[in-house]
């Protein structure tokens, strides 16, 4: 039985080295704050759009989506379909503010619209959520690589963390975006190799794969049940997917920072359009890959010997079935996905820490070069912190569940606050804070006392935050004109 050969190890090591060198090449000793955090606002919209996808296309998705359809069916595909549906809303409502206000972080907008307290709270919520996500993205694939190749988990985490922190600290956002572009195409190539190889070895090729998948029920894509406890309810997927797709594009600094690097409102809008157009077929391809793997192993059940965790089906197939060298490329693609998420994460985390807290609260009158230096130190600090968190994690499953619960509680209220700010003139800062508290409590109650689908928790958080925040604001004096004009949709 074929295993991971020396050439495969060399391919992975070479890939990591090249990424590190390319990222480090963007180092500028006297970089200003705008250059380090925003690339001088000169990044091409194509690169920014691709980087947005890479920022959230972690190894959890690259391995998890195919694993899901391998074990179940295609019903989860409805969630990402919401991306092109919410893109026009993002472009119409949010992009004008984000491109014209010259922001470093999305949370600066919240101070102008509401208050400093709202800005700091939401920035802190983002930092907790994204920091946890980076740790998950590092630990998950490391655990699987340990199962497949026998590499100690701590070594996988340490190497990924070290290389990613190295080039992100040196090159700033330019290094992040351009290495994201490279890693995006590496992931797409790796998944394509797996799907094509699997389909070619199924009796009958593509037609045989389709027939086998249809017979096994793997091509089921709809579940019209109204039962809120069913994870794959199409209604829950569409409703929850809309929130899950909109929230990152409007509230997540790791995503928005790429938009802030573009040259104009038009370029910002084009980046959102590109992301929304590309992400659906990419995720669809991931689910199709899982179906192809099922058909392959259904035809060759003897080749499954040695698989102890079905979630590892993608690297298992790559190591066992792809030619030597190409196996290394696919494993490198899995590493690439996690590295892209980490680079996006620690860069945005240090931007929020530096701009929202260090500059705004503690040292507001330093030079642009000083803040860039603090940004490098912060990137190194966040890289070490997230790597250590991943190293100290013993049970990836528990961590993943903890992240999902945290995301469900936090993401909906965050989106609700931004919607209150951009769509209503009457909402006040204290009202928005009360709404966020109510939204988080509502989601926590749903989690504690029901078994409703995870996808419904985001919409509940948004709805309760919006309604409670607006009603609470009606009991307070109306916001000043300076907090409304040019900061609410329709007043620009």
Image (spheres, helix red, strand yellow):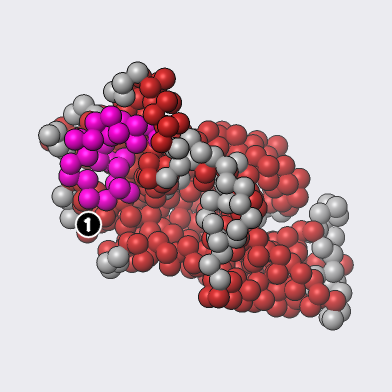
| Circle 1 residue | 153
- Could you say where residue 141 lies in the image, as x and y percent from the top left? 31, 51
Task: Name the residue: 72% across, 51% down.
Answer: 94
Task: Name the residue: 52% across, 63% down.
Answer: 407
Residue sitting nearer the eye, 490 or 376: 490
Q: Quadrant of the N terminus?
A: top left
Does the magenta run of residues contain 132?
Answer: no
Task: Name the residue: 32% across, 57% down.
Answer: 139
Q: Residue furthest bottom?
A: 475
Left or right of 425 in this view: 228: left
- Could you say where residue 22 lies in the image, as x and y percent from the top left? 36, 38
> Can you tell which quarter of the image residue 428 is in?
bottom right
Is residue 353 in view? Answer: no
> Can you tell which quarter of the image residue 43 is in?
top right
Left or right of 387 in this view: 376: right
Residue sitting nearer the eye, 472 or 20: 472
Magenta span: helix, strand or loop, mainly? helix
> Can you tell which quarter of the image residue 199 is in?
top left
Q: Is residue 153 above or below residue 313?
A: below
Task: Name the residue: 81% across, 75% down.
Answer: 471
Q: Is residue 381 above or below residue 96?
A: below
Q: Is residue 468 above or below residue 295?
A: below
- Could you say where residue 361 lies in the image, as x and y percent from the top left? 58, 74
Left or right of 377 in this view: 81: right
Residue sitting nearer the eye, 254 or 40: 254
Does the magenta run of residues contain 317?
Answer: yes
| Stretch in magenta | 291-319
């Amino acid at each position: 039985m074929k295993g991971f050969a020396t050439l495969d190890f060399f391919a992975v090591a070479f890939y990591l080295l090249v990424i590190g060198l390319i990222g480090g090449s963007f180092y500028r000793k006297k970089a200003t704050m705008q250059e380090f955090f925003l690339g001088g606002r000169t990044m091409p919209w194509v690169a920014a759009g691709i980087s947005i996808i890479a920022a959230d296309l972690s190894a959890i998705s690259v391995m998890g989506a195919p694993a899901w359809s391998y074990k179940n069916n295609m019903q989860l595909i409805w969630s990402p379909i919401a991306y092109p549906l919410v893109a026009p809303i993002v472009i119409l409502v949010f992009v004008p503010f984000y491109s014209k206000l010259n922001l470093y972080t999305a949370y600066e907008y919240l101070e102008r619209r509401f208050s400093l307290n709202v800005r700091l709270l939401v920035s802190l919520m983002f930092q907790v959520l994204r920091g946890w996500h980076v740790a998950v993205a590092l630990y998950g694939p490391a655990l699987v690589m340990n199962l497949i190749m026998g590499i100690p988990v701590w070594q996988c985490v340490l190497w990924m963390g070290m290389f990613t922190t190295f080039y992100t600290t040196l090159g700033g956002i330019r290094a992040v975006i351009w290495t994201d572009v490279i890693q995006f195409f590496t992931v797409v190539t790796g998944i394509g190799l797996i799907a094509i190889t699997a389909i070619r070895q199924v009796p009958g090729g593509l037609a045989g794969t389709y027939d086998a998948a249809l017979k096994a029920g793997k091509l089921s894509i709809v579940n019209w049940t109204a039962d809120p406890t069913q994870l794959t309810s199409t209604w829950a997927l569409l409703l929850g997917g809309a929130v899950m797709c909109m929230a990152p594009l409007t509230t997540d600094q790791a995503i928005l920072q790429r938009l802030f690097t573009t040259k104009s409102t038009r370029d910002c809008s084009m980046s959102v359009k590109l992301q929304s157009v590309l992400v659906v077929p990419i995720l669809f391809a991931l689910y199709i890959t899982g179906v192809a793997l099922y058909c392959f192993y259904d035809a060759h059940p003897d080749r499954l010997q040695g698989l102890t965790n079905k979630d590892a089906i993608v690297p298992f197939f790559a190591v066992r079935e792809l030619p030597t060298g190409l196996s290394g490329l696919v494993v490198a693609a899995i590493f690439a996905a996690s590295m892209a998420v980490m680079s996006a994460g620690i860069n945005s985390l240090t931007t929020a820490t530096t701009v929202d807290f260090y500059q705004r609260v503690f040292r507001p009158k330093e030079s642009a070069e000083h803040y860039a230096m603090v940004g490098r130190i912060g990137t190194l600090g966040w890289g070490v912190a997230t790597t250590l968190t991943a190293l100290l994690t013993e049970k990836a499953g528990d961590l993943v569940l903890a992240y999902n619960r945290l995301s469900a509680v936090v993401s909906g209220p965050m989106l609700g606050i931004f919607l209150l700010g951009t769509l209503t003139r009457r909402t006040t800062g204290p009202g928005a804070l009360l709404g966020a508290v109510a939204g988080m409590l509502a989601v926590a109650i749903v989690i504690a006392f029901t078994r409703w689908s995870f996808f419904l928790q985001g919409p509940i958080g948004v709805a309760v935050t919006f309604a409670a925040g607006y009603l609470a604001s009606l009991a307070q004096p109306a916001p000043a004109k300076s907090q409304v004009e040019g900061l609410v949709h329709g007043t620009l």
